Amino acid sequence: MKKKRWMTGSLEQQLFFLGCWVPAVGLLGGLAVQWASKHVPAIFQECLWNRVFGIYCFGCGGTRAFLALCRGHVLLALWYHPLVVYGAVLYLVFMVRHLIFLISKGRFRGMRFRGGYLYAAIGIMLVNFIVKNLLRQVFGILMEG
């Protein structure tokens, strides 16, 4: 089977190609969230983990953070879920640096994929999970939006 042209390049080239689709997918996702918030009963919008166990899950606040970031409220997005802001910054830096790499025909280095980026994301997610649940259980501070 012949591989598609975009699949034969480096990992960074493949990530750049896929990254070009992120704005379209994000727009569709945002529209789906807006539609669901008006048409889906509230019981299905609440996190099941939160409702059953009374604690925030690892992803709680992600959608709110995404919507806050889209509205330009970076600090609010950081409060809801810092991983969303981290991912957005990493995405923008990668896409801009790789675009410069492509335009310059390799004279300027693009950003290389490193496992450390994933480890940092996992660390952010774990710290967020621990801090948000400590604030909720010990001090009664909720992450309501």
Image (cartoon, rainbow, N blue to C red):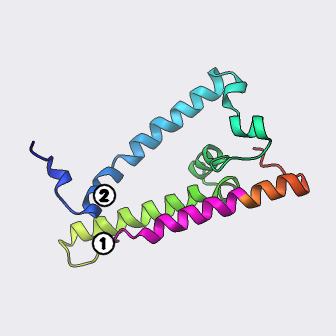
Rendered location of residue 111, percent (x, y): 35, 71
**Magenta region, residue range:** 112-129
Type of the residue with mark 1? Gly
SS at circle 1: loop
Residue 37 in the image: above or below residue 111: above
Q: Residue 97: which quarter of the image?
A: bottom left
N-term mark: 2 or 1: 2
At 83% from the left and 57% from the top, the residue drawn is 135
**Count of numbered tags:** 2
Task: Pick the quarter of the image with the N terminus.
Answer: top left
| Label 2 neighbour load within 10 Å: few <14, some 14-19, many 20+ | many
* Badge 2 vs badge 1, beta-carbon distance below 8 Å: yes
Find disc 2 in the rendering and name its residue. 16
Tell me if residue 57 is in the magenta stretch: no
State the mark number for residue 110: 1
Residue 107 is situated, as x and y percent measured from the top left of the image, at: 21, 79
Residue at (51%, 67%) from the top-left corner?
119
Residue 119 colored in magenta in the image: yes
Q: Main secondary structure of the magenta part?
A: helix
